[in-house]
Image: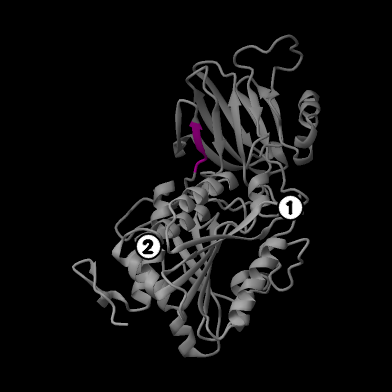
Amino acid sequence: ASFVTQTAVTGGEDALVGNVNKLIVSPPGYSGTPRKGHLVFDACFESGNLGRVDYISEFEFDLFIRPDTCNPRFRVWFNFTVENVRETQRVIFNVVNFSKTKSLYRDGMSPVVKSTSRPKWQRLPAKNVYYYRCPDHRRNYVMSFAFCFDREDDVYQFAYCYPYTYSRLQHYLATLERRNLPYLQREQLGLSVQQRRLDLLTITNSEREKKLVFLTARVHPGESPASFVCQGVIDFLVSQHPVAQILRDHVIFKIVPMLNPDGVYLGNYRCSLMGFDLNRHWQDPSPWAHPTLHAVKQLIVQMNQDPRVSLEFYIDVHAHSTMLNGFMYGNVFEDEERVQRQAVFPRLLCQNAPDFSFSNTSFNRDVVKAGTGRRFLGGLLDDTSYCYTLEVSFYSYMTAGSTAPVPYTEETYMKLGRNVARTFLDYYKLNNLIKDNRPTPIQR
């Protein structure tokens, strides 16, 4: 399939990233204008990822994930479009070069799809998806899915999970800003290597001496569910809900919704533009190589030194590729009482969120996790602060009553975020301020 590689390297700046660019995959030996059914693949768009396509037969295509920029180790996220289809054309796509072996594809996960005439993302039926070790691909793990194109004029888009792009975030934040809410402040904390915005939101009624909760998301760009959870938190905290009003009176929320905007933009799974897993560089982030991390760490260190600020929580939101449900990672302490106190928030969250699993929640001190936000800040902040990684499954959750896993949707990811925000009401024992769901005036 030499024509494939030729097409993939043309195209100016796109060649830098190595995504296929309006790649026409015709049968070998075919020349002339492409016919209907000669599929055209494209991933030269924001958060796109597809590195190569091999024609196997008119019904079958091998797809290669483009590795993270400057880091060949990570190949998980994919996001591409297909057009010029023939009506009722049935195909099998084999994604052949995943860098992970364990995957939720073994447990029923399936890619998501949308098309021009059906713009809402939906999951493919699990029965059309196979995940197996393939002798034809050096015993690599392959995820194959069957699909039937039904509308000739549609452009179809497939992705590993619901995409949430940098532009989508910018649009969302601009819309929030236009509402001129007195308790919401948006500022640019810094810029990424490629000069994208690092946004910081502050949500509170007045910045008197109060407890402070710091939340970050999308340090790993392919973990798009983290952005839906984060948006759920923000939507709830800026709402007119009585619980949100009380929380704004008592707590300052600082939120950095996208720690790795370049990686998100480029369609990487785990790394920044320069190939760094930013979540391993908290100990000593460089202002030029890890500028977003450097800016956030500086802010946290500065707030931690300010006697007027009581930084009580740091939560970093991620998505998990082999586990179900939402769950948390916390730190390990010698002091038993502190261990118990650290378990309080996840226990309360478990009561508010049916998809949150306390049994999957664990507390660890693996050496490999030493450079993560949770571990580094756990060592930096004092013993009244708690640092967690909040994980949510790329695929689904089991509730107490369910016999089969329930696949997550964009909406249910956001709902988990709303439940995380609500849980601070219970944690800070502010429930008594709500009577018949109406907040009572607080005695100053």
Q: Residue at x 28, y 82 (%)?
A: 443
Q: Is residue 59 left or right of residue 230?
A: right
Q: Residue at x 55, y 89 (%)?
A: 334
What amino acid type should be assigned to the residue bearing mark 2?
Asn
What residue is pinned by disc 1? 73
Q: Position of residue 416 (x, y in %)?
A: 40, 58
Instruction: Tell me the element at label 1.
Output: loop
* Boundaries of the magenta span: 110-114
Q: Residue furthest left?
A: 436
Can residue 98 be seen at all in this image of the molecule? Answer: no
Q: Quadrant of residue 282?
A: bottom right
Asked whether 175 or 88 is in front, the reply is: 175
Asked whether 100 or 336 is in front, the reply is: 336
Residue 442 to residue 324: above or below? below
Disc on the earlier residue, 2 or 1: 1
What amino acid type should be assigned to the residue bearing mark 1?
Arg
What residue is pinned by disc 2? 419
Q: Position of residue 271 (x, y in %)?
A: 69, 55
Instruction: Indicate which label's residue lies in the foreground, 2 or 1.
Output: 2
**Number of marks drawn:** 2
Q: Quadrant of the N terminus?
A: top right
Q: Residues within 10 Å of mark 2 (few under 14, many from 20)?
A: many
Q: Is residue 304 left or right of residue 361?
A: right
Residue 346 to residue 309: above or below? above
